[in-house]
Image (spheres, rainbow, N blue to C red):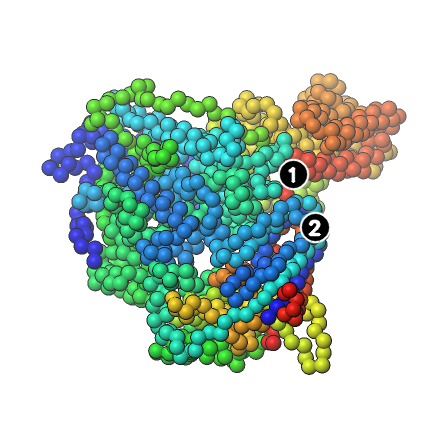
């Protein structure tokens, strides 16, 4: 079987022409690179790393945490003619796979005629039975393939990617970063542009829309920011003018699917899915733990024809590695020409003789699961003999679930390594999208250079260095600069969708967390400033007590911590806030997560700058020593970092004001901050005014009043107006009723009222009335104290009313959530339980 | 045999459900040995959307969507069914079990659809111990039906019917160890055993006629859902249904709803709800034999 296998060595060099010389398209490039020198190139590599880290370009490898993306400064150029051949070969494969999927989800002739073995279809977890017989005009809109070039110079497909292939956004990002960091290599070179690919893709999405009313609602369905490729989802949603949504943003009604927006439900026409087919609809598919990610009724709507999903659910199954052994026969079954771009020679071990062939020459083969296209192939020679025997025994027990692919060593290309340029094996991923009846390739791609440790033949890199892929034009005679390139007329893009409810919700909470963080920092700084003094006067000690009470109402210390004022346990309680589970890392984490959730809605500048600053802040927080032993510097250092928190909060506010469009998201960000601030004011004041003795000794109230000004950053304003005399009425007027004080309560309430007015359609929400009531109460409190003959006595009667106000503000948050975010409760499945089953008759 | 069937499923939720979607396998499947004279579904509250169609296995399936807030959901399936499956061929006349297994594995014409039921599935995963339990019924060269009948009888003999001994999540390996369970467990166990030998086996969901103890009247609503096993006899012979809970060959006392790889493919009512909190489920089944005259 499988006569005429290609030779396994030596690995081909991408630069070599086989006659001892350099291939033409490498000559100039290599000249430039050598001219720059290996040290300079290593430095450029480090600069690229920093750029990706700062911009938050990450990927997540299975089982790992977010890893910054890495790109080699040396690109991989491909001559136009060679690329055209690859494009044609892949288009042919895509057509064959499309026909195969249409058959397997339709008449299943391939099975009935024995072209495909049942064992490669029925046990495939990605063969989605509920999609069998579903009307489907196309299964694949996007197709990608991983390719390697063997020692014989022939490119071959290592893996077909038919689910939701990723990498295009990274390809764009590589090009952008490379042209910035290594501009020299781009000079006087003419490269094909990658952008048109996304325009073609977007037109195909538009074309798929049922009904064709000209302005279809396109959504990109992502599993969310925890997904490995969230960064790509954000970029693609932008490039393709899709609304980025998660399952929870969509709801099925009467055979159609809708996006929950601030303006109500908006019907969805096309779902570009970036998650596995199995997780799409928990009603009909075995979602496993992905229940919350899918949309119940999505398949029903697709079956109804009211929306289209691309790629079709179930297209994932074509990634099964074992199918590669049958693709030529499948092509022949459909009358297609023999594949011009073959797979890496693959055996399905269910075929007679296949297992024996592998056992005969284990060094030649990589073993892989027949149905799992994601699992890495295992080189048999890599294993201990015991492990190899065990693996072969498993394959012998269940040959149908195993495949073997030839251990072809991929070609090598130069990369910047620690010791200068070094050749590394290359895996190339190319992307095709539908264009009319045919396919169009991304004029570029994503190459990955395998780490030397991974240099085993055919193994897909787990953690690899990416390479920018250049499609050169020099050998076609059509030298074209980017300006001269014939770009199809750009379709008018109308970003669809009003603000999704979830985004509004996220903005609201972003605002609240940010304010909470800022409030905590301000409060803690006031505390630390007092602790740093060598000795405290009784009055200062009283202030510290009050501050500790404020810390407690904000849950920054517990009751024990509050009582510890004046003992060494108190600073320890403050430093405990820095522990990983402590409030400060938690709050910065929440701010970071909110920012990540909103990444698609923040401008690049705002995201990058805020993200960068937040990371530095988190690093600084981690840098504060929190050990058990007393560290006199620790509190001072914490105070310094908290100053950074205040700067960060101010910076985000400034960026929002300068970069974000009025209304929509910014409005909710603002609402969140205002509401949180209003709640903090009432909570703190309710504690600061607790001073029973002040009825007879008004001076007792002074520390509380001073703190009320200090925590609201209003000391200077007060001093300018009233010099130094502290009296309850002016203080409370400034903190509660003064409309012009941006840190006072009235200002927050008015800003909220304005925000709701601009949202419109809020008559039924009762918001303006509720806010008006709080405002009236705030004015009344300040007014009553001012009118009282004994101001201090009137002031100390306020805490219960302030607490009630704090509660009302909390209820406002619930009203906002109900009215605008329309959050649905969690999904749960029913029916797994069995009714009492039948007994013996 | 003519039956009137009535199957009510009722959910009561602790807090209101805002949105619900249910997939129903509650309509008997029309088969050469089973005529479905009438069938209807009655949901309460009224469905915002109710579709009827066929699933991948050819079973009737309905999808039901509720959009209004509700604290209870009830669906009643009613049907009139005339059942009379033909007697299986003489066991000795069936192919040797090895050749049936080989035909299934090869797939292609006449066998590719049966091959679907060869592979492990979520609720009938491969289990070597269960395979070893089934193996003694299939000595080399034994006609496949002879082996199947032997296994059917052994399960009835070796296992105690004990409601409550197992639940939906109990794996077949535990059923084997405990030697006790209910019809669903015995069916999954038999399926896993047959697949381990390379024989296609499918899970059949339906109902069984109950006979009241002598001298007592039939109790209305006291019946229940039942499950048994479809077994493949080879390309020419097709399928025969065996009931390991009762050591029966399915003829005219069983009503078929549908079949799949295991329970999960054909669970009578399953759904996804938003809200609801805790819920309780009650089911009432009534399978009433009717005099033949009722057809006319």
Answer left or right for A155 relative to A617. left
At label 1, counting other C-alpha atoms closer than 10 Å, the crowd grade (few under 14, some 14-19, many 20 or more) is some
Q: Is residue A374 above or below residue A648?
A: below
Q: Nearer the viewer, residue A285 or A233?
A: A285
Q: Nearer the viewer, residue B259 or A806?
A: B259
Answer left or right for A597 relative to A755. left
At label 2, counting other C-alpha atoms closer than 10 Å, the crowd grade (few under 14, some 14-19, many 20 or more) is some
Residue A45 showing in the rendered view: no
Name the quarter where the C terminus of chain A is drawn: bottom right
Residue visible at 30% across and 64% down in the picture: A392
Residue visible at 52% across and 54% down in the picture: B54
Disc 2 is placed on an element classified as loop
Q: In x, y percent, where is residue A558?
A: 67, 46
Q: In x, y percent, where is residue A333?
A: 30, 49
Q: Quadrant of residue A571?
A: top right
Q: Quadrant of residue B143?
A: bottom left
Name the quarter where the N terminus of chain A is drawn: bottom left
Q: Nearer the viewer, residue B29 or A503?
A: B29
- Residue positioned most to the left: A19
Residue visible at 37% across and 23% down in the picture: A488
Residue A221 showing in the rendered view: yes
Could you say which disc has been placed on residue A822 in the image?
1
> For the residues marked 2 and 1, what is the alpha-carbon distance in whole angstroms?
23 Å
> To which chain does the residue with label 1 belong?
A
Could you say which disc has been placed on residue B45 in the image?
2
Answer left or right for A275 relative to A332. right
Q: In x, y percent, where is residue A730?
A: 78, 23
Disc 2 to disc 1: CB gap under 8 Å: no
Nearer the camera: disc 2 or disc 1? 2
Could you say which disc has been placed on residue B192 in the image?
none
Disc 1 is placed on an element classified as loop
């Amino acid at each position: 079987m499988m006569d005429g296998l290609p030779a396994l060595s030596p690995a081909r060099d991408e630069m070599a022409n086989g006659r001892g010389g350099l291939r033409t398209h490498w000559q100039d490039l290599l000249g430039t690179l050598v001219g720059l020198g290996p040290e300079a190139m290593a430095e450029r590599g480090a600069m690229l790393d920093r750029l990706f880290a700062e911009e938050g370009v990450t990927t997540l490898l299975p089982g790992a945490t977010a890893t910054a993306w890495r790109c080699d400064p040396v690109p991989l150029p491909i001559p136009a003619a060679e690329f055209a051949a690859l494009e044609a070969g892949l288009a042919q494969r895509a057509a064959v796979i499309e026909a195969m999927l249409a058959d397997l989800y339709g008449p299943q002739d391939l099975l009935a005629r024995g072209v495909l073995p049942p064992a490669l279809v029925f046990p495939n977890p990605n063969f989605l039975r509920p999609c069998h017989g579903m009307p489907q005009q196309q299964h694949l809109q996007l197709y990608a393939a991983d390719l390697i070039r063997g020692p014989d110079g022939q490119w071959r497909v290592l893996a077909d990617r038919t689910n939701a292939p990723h990498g295009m956004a990274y390809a764009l990002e590589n090009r952008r970063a490379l042209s910035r960091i290594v501009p020299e290599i781009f000079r006087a070179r003419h490269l094909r542009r990658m952008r048109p690919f996304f325009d073609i893709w977007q037109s195909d999405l538009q074309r798929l829309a049922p009904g064709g009313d000209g302005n279809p609602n396109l959504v990109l369905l992502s599993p969310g920011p925890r997904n490995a490729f969230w960064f790509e989802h954000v970029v693609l949603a932008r490039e393709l003018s899709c609304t980025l949504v998660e399952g929870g943003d969509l709801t099925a009604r009467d055979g159609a699917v809708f996006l929950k927006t601030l303006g109500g439900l908006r019907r969805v026409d096309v779902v570009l899915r970036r998650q596995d087919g199995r997780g799409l609809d928990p009603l009909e598919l075995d979602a496993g733990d992905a229940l919350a990610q899918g949309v119940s009724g999505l398949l029903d709507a697709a079956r109804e024809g009211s929306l289209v999903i691309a790629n079709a659910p179930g297209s994932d199954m074509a990634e099964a590695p074992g199918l590669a052994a049958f693709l030529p026969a499948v092509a022949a079954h459909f009358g297609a020409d023999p594949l011009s771009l073959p797979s890496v020679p693959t055996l399905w071990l269910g075929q007679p003789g296949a297992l024996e062939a592998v056992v005969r020459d284990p060094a030649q083969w990589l073993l892989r699961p027949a149905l799992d296209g994601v699992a890495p192939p295992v080189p048999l020679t890599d294993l201990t003999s015991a492990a190899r025997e065990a693996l072969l025994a498993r394959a012998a027990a269940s040959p149908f679930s195993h495949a073997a692919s030839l251990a072809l060593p991929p070609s090598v290309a130069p990369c910047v390594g620690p010791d200068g340029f070094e050749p590394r094996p290359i895996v190339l991923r190319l992307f095709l999208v539908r264009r009319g009846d045919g396919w169009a390739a991304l004029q570029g791609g994503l190459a990955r250079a395998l780490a030397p440790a991974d240099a085993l033949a055919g193994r897909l890199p787990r953690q690899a260095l990416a390479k920018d892929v250049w499609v050169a034009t020099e050998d076609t005679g059509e030298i074209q600069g980017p300006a001269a390139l014939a770009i199809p007329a750009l379709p008018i893009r109308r970003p669809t969708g009003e603000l999704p409810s979830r985004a509004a919700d996220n903005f609201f909470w972003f605002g609240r967390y940010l304010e909470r963080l800022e409030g905590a920092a301000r409060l803690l700084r006031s505390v630390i400033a007092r602790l740093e003094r060598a000795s405290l006067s009784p009055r200062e000690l009283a202030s510290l007590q009050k501050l500790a009470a404020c810390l407690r109402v904000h849950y920054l210390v517990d009751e024990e911590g509050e009582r510890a004022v004046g003992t060494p346990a108190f600073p320890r309680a403050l430093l405990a806030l820095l522990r990983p589970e402590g409030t400060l890392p938690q709050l910065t984490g929440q701010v970071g997560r909110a920012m990540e959730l909103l990444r698609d809605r923040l401008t690049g500048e705002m995201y990058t700058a805020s993200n960068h600053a937040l990371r530095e802040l988190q690093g600084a927080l981690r840098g504060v020593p929190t050990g058990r032993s007393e560290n006199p510097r620790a509190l001072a250092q914490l105070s310094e970092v908290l100053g950074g928190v205040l700067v960060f909060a101010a910076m985000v506010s400034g960026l929002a004001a300068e970069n974000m469009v009025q209304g929509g998201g910014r409005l909710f960000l603002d609402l969140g901050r205002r509401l949180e601030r209003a709640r903090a004011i009432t909570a703190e004041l309710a504690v600061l005014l607790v001073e029973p003795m002040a009825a007879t000794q008004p001076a007792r109230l002074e520390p509380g009043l001073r703190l009320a000004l200090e925590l609201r950053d209003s000391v200077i304003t007060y001093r300018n107006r009233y010099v130094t005399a502290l009296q309850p009425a002016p203080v409370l007027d400034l903190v509660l009723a003064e409309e012009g004080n941006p840190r006072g309560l009235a200002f927050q309430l008015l800003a909220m009222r304005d925000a709701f007015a601009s949202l419109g359609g809020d008559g039924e929400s009762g918001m303006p009335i509720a806010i008006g009531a709080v405002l009236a109460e705030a004015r009344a409190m300040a007014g009553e104290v001012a009118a009282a003959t004994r101001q201090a006595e009137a002031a100390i009667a306020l805490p219960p009313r302030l607490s009630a106000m704090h509660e009302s503000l909390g209820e406002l948050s619930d009203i906002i959530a109900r009215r605008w975010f329309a959050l649905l409760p969690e999904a749960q499945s029913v029916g797994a339980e069995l009714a009492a089953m039948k007994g013996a008759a | 045999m003519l039956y009137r069937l009535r199957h009510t499923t009722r959910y009561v939720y602790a807090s209101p459900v805002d949105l619900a979607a249910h997939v129903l396998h509650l309509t008997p499947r029309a088969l050469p040995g089973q005529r479905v004279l009438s069938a209807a579904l009655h949901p309460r509250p009224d469905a915002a959307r109710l579709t009827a169609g066929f699933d991948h296995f050819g079973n009737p399936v309905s999808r039901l969507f509720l959009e209004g807030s509700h604290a209870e959901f009830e669906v009643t399936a009613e049907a009139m069914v005339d059942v009379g499956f033909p007697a299986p061929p003489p066991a000795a006349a069936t192919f040797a079990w090895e050749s049936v297994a080989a035909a299934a594995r090869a797939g292609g014409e006449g066998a590719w659809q049966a091959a679907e039921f060869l592979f492990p599935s979520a609720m009938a995963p491969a289990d070597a111990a269960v395979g070893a339990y089934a193996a003694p019924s299939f000595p080399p060269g034994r006609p496949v039906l002879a082996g199947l009948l032997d296994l059917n009888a052994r399960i009835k003999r070796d296992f105690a019917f004990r409601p409550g001994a197992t639940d939906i999540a109990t794996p077949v390996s535990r059923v084997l160890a405990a030697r006790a369970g209910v019809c669903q467990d015995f069916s999954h166990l038999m399926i896993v055993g047959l697949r381990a030998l390379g024989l296609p086996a499918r899970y059949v969901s339906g109902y069984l006629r109950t006979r009241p103890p002598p001298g007592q009247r039939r109790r209305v609503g006291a019946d229940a859902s039942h499950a048994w096993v479809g077994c493949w006899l080879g390309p020419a012979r097709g399928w025969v249904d065996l009931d390991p809970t009762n050591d029966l060959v399915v003829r005219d006392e069983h009503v078929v709803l549908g079949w799949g790889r295991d329970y999960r493919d054909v669970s009578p009512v399953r759904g996804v709800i938003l809200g609801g909190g805790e819920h309780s489920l009650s089911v009432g089944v009534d399978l009433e034999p009717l005099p033949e005259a009722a057809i006319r």
